[in-house]
Image: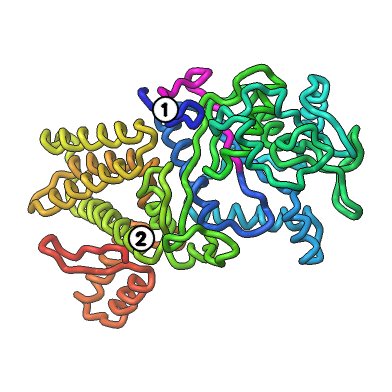
Amino acid sequence: MALKIYNTLTRNKDLFVPQEPGKVKMYVCGPTVYDFIHIGNARPMIVFDVVRTYLEQLGNEVNYVVNFTDIDDKLIRKAEQTGSTVPEVADTFIGAYYEDLEGLGLTRATLNPRVTENMDSILEFIQELEQKSFAYENGGDVFYRTHKFKDYGKLSHQNIEELQFGIRIGVDERKEHPEDFVLWKAAKPGEIAWSSPWGDGRPGWHIECSAMARRYLGDSIDIHGGGQDLQFPHHECEVAQTEALTGKKFANYWMHNGYININNEKMSKSLGNGILVKDLRKQYKWESIRYFMLSSQYRNPLNFNDETIDQAEKSTERIRNAVDNVKHRLTAVVEDKAATVNEALQDRLTDIIATYHAKMQDDFNTPDAITAMFEWVYEANALLQEPVVKAVDLHALLQAFNEMNQVLRLYAVHEGELIDEEIEKLIVERVNARKDKNWGRADEIRDLLDSRGIVLEDTAQGMRWRRK
């Protein structure tokens, strides 16, 4: 394996070497579950699904942890607005998150820990920081002594002196230094709270991930990921907390995906231009959404508009038609176990797969990996033009495609869609009905196939079908 990952910490593409051969520990910051996820939330979900799946394709066992922040000012406000409780709000939107996750064709993480289920670990973490003099209490709040951690700023490549100039007037006077950040927040009257040595309250945002990563993955992990917006201060503070406590390097590789703009404008609530995943899924198949996300290198910004998503839909349709045509042709040829794959075809497929892996191992370069998939489409379409095609060649095509699609996943049969075998049986039945002049049944089958998104076409090789 020669996988290289662009490491935010080093600002270089570093050769990936897991701490334990064949096993990868990966933590990615998940959503604050106070609302439905938007397209910006979906990008890290898809990006790190690709990272995880490709690492598994290379033979690794990946322990993939994505947290839920289920206690936060936003959840408290949502509970007040809806007349419900914070746990009820969290349960509602965690359920919605899983619906969107599955609706995007993604696999659940190994573990999705909740902050509220890890309060003991968080309190223990803060107490240990306090014992090491990295934390101090004032007025029921507990703060982190940023100046005591000499490497603060190494991830975002900033220094404390520069940061001080960016801190606005009105800093909490209980802090020893303006850039100190909160580890534990004293509860306001009527707020949900947990008991602690410093009084009732709840954790600050940064401490949550440090505590959960340590509990479920250990003191030091392989990959820590999240959106570019989390690099500072969230991930910077995670580094400071964890490394101050353990004395070990927290994460060997830091990965951050770029922003998504909407019609060339930053997505924001003030502009009202956010797009919810649940609404996007009603308009487009998840392969098209996934294609859009993977059509740019994950660290680069993405611009969403009608043109880019429509283009993504057309591109996945080209892939889908090629695969379906290969599968259809396979049903019309005779299997010959003694036959061997055409040597020239095998060489081209070997080159395509080699290109796919070379691009994926270059910091998960999905745009170029997708180009390799379209090279496959070209080879598939060329072979299908031949009057005589061997089953073994078609199998070779599908085997190569499946290797790429295992990670890129730009082709899928959706729930409710007719599977290939069902379509073939219906087509045979329709042909027989027409021979018997049973026009009513023939029309019924045609309408059924059309309603399921299946288009019938006459070709030199006989009736073929494709999905719309």
Residue 434 figure quarter: bottom left
**Residue 294 within the segment the image draws in magenta:** no
Q: Amino acid at mark 1?
A: Asn
Q: Magenta span covers which residues?
A: 13-29
Most foreground residue, 280 or 130: 130
Give the image location of residue 279, x and y in percent: 52, 66
Q: Is residue 284 above or below residue 381?
A: below
Q: Is residue 128 left or right of residue 46?
A: right
Identify the mark at residue 308; answer none if there is no mark.
Answer: 2
**Mark 1 packing: few (<14 Cα in 10 Å), some, or many (20+)?**
few
Q: Is residue 335 left or right of residue 111?
A: left
Most foreground residue, 235 or 426: 235
Give the image location of residue 346, x and y in percent: 17, 35
Q: Amino acid at mark 2?
A: Thr
User: Which residue was labeled with disc 1?
Assistant: 12
Give the image location of residue 193, x and y in percent: 86, 46
Identify the mark at residue 78; answer none if there is no mark.
Answer: none
Residue 160 figure quarter: top right
**Mark 2 packing: few (<14 Cα in 10 Å), some, or many (20+)?**
some
**Residue 23 within the segment the image draws in magenta:** yes
Q: Is residue 47 left or right of residue 87?
A: left
Q: Secondary structure at mark 1?
A: strand
Q: Is residue 217 above or below residue 332?
A: above
* Residue sitting at the far bottom: 440
Q: Is residue 311 left or right of residue 232?
A: left
Q: Identify the mark nearer the N-term, 1 or 2.
A: 1
